[in-house]
């Protein structure tokens, strides 16, 4: 049983990988495969199915001693190449920036228990990754244990994890608020609208119906309040500007797609550097909100359509997209994208999305793609508020 610092040995349930001999350092790609005498059977070698074994001696047939003498060492020589072709996953551990919850002892314990290799620190004490050959049977039990320690644990295929496009929700994802709740507070109907928002984001209410009901409660609100809310109430989720700047420095494209309103997505996209944005429209007459939203309403299916259309215009496939969101109306795009990230998400979203970030900020999406902190790009003149 592998222990965790500050906890009893029985709390972290890690299954030891019996034949693991791992070389651990700042970066390490070596791991040992022990072979004693003829511990790999003739039958195993015969079923390896590798073209590299075509050079084996055909002058005799197994399991004769001559066949073993001719071919066993040849087969073992190609074993590393055969192993490398097996499906491989990357395990990422990360925490809230500045928390330094990751210790070498903890990470090396999990590395050894899961038979990992290629341990790499992406940010000292804050983000680390290593490779594993198969998905661990006790993944979600260990995930729950790590959550209690303030650590996010993500296991994903290593192939293709660095994406070419970011598709992001806005409310409670790129910004820390729900815009409609902030407008409602100014209109004197804050608690009622916030309750509807919470239920809609957790999938308890139909999104379009809930949006119409909430916008209806804003009827008559002076449109000047929108600008005041943007300036005084909206703050950006930590790490968002760095996420965009780093991906775009590598040729990436960024799209903001929100079930909120263009009155907010336009300045948010401009401030953070999104290439494009889509959202709903608040209808206005004579400087006041009419209580209606423009059609068609951008909801769950429209976000899926946006992913398909925007990626296609960039010559990309959904597999090339990294999507991030927190609410039930984000589920479609999160499930279609090559990597869908549930960021500080509602329970219904966490139940259906395996890549979950509950403790890290938006820079976690860079660590998931294999970026180190030293590779982050920090844009100039970007603050945490508009």
Image (cartoon, rainbow, N blue to C red):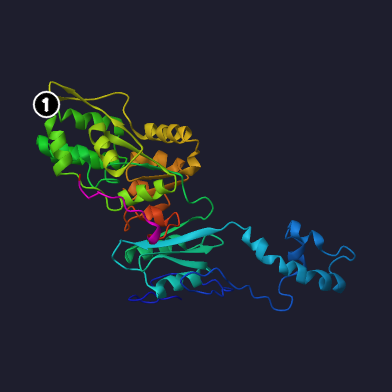
- Prevalent SS, magenta region: loop
Residue drawn 73% across the image and 58% down it = 50
* Percent coordinates x, y for residue 48 in the rendering: 72, 60
On screen, residue 304 above or below 232: above
Q: Please determine whether, in this image, residue 221 is positioned above or below residue 142.
A: above
The x and y percentages for residue 75 are 75, 67
Q: Is residue 327 magenta?
A: no
Residue 204's image quarter?
top left
Residue 48 appears in the figure: yes
* Residue 199: % across, % down: 26, 41
SS class of the residue under badge 1? loop
Residue at image mark 1: 220
| Residue 97 rendering spot, x and y as whole percentages | 30, 62
Magenta region, residue range:
374-385
The extreme right residue here reads 59
Q: Residue at x 11, y 29 (%)?
A: 222
Q: Is residue 375 on the magenta stretch?
A: yes
Q: Is residue 350 visible?
A: no
Q: Say above or below: 149 vs 384.
A: below
């Amino acid at each position: 049983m592998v222990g965790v610092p500050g906890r009893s040995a029985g709390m972290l349930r890690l299954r030891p990988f019996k034949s693991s001999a791992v070389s651990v350092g700042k970066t390490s790609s070596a791991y040992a495969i022990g072979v004693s005498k003829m511990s790999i059977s003739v039958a195993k070698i015969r079923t390896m199915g590798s073209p590299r074994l075509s050079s084996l001696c055909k002058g005799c047939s197994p399991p004769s001693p001559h066949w073993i003498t001719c071919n066993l060492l040849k087969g073992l020589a190609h074993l590393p190449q055969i192993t490398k072709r097996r499906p491989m996953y990357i395990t990422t551990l990360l925490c809230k920036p500045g928390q330094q919850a990751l210790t070498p002892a903890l990470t090396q314990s999990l590395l050894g228990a899961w038979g990992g290799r290629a341990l790499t620190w992406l940010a000292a004490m804050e983000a680390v990754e290593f490779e594993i050959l198969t998905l661990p049977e006790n993944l979600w039990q260990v995930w729950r244990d790590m959550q209690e320690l303030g650590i996010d644990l993500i296991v994903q295929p290593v192939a293709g994890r660095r994406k070419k496009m970011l598709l992001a929700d806005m409310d409670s994802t790129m910004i820390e608020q729900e815009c409609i709740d902030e407008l409602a507070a100014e209109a004197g109907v804050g608690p009622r609208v916030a309750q509807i928002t919470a239920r809609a984001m957790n999938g308890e209410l139909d999104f379009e119906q809930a949006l119409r009901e909430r916008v209806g409660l804003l009827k008559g609100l002076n449109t000047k309040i929108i600008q005041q809310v943007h300036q005084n109430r909206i703050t950006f989720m930590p790490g968002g500007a760095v996420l965009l700047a780093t991906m775009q420095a590598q040729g990436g494209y960024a799209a903001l797609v929100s079930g909120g309103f263009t009155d907010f997505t336009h300045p948010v996209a401009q401030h953070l550097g999104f290439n494009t944005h889509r959202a709903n429209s608040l209808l206005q007459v004579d400087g006041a909100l009419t209580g209606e939203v423009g059609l068609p309403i951008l909801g769950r299916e429209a976000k899926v359509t946006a992913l398909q259309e925007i990626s296609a215009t960039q010559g990309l496939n959904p597999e090339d997209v990294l999507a991030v969101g927190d609410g039930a109306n984000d589920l479609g795009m999160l499930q279609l994208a090559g990597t869908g990230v549930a960021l500080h998400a509602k329970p219904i979203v966490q139940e259906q999305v395996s890549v979950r970030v509950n403790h890290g900020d938006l820079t976690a999406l860079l660590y998931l793609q294999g970026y180190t902190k030293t590779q982050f790009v920090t844009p100039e003149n970007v603050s945490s508020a508009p």
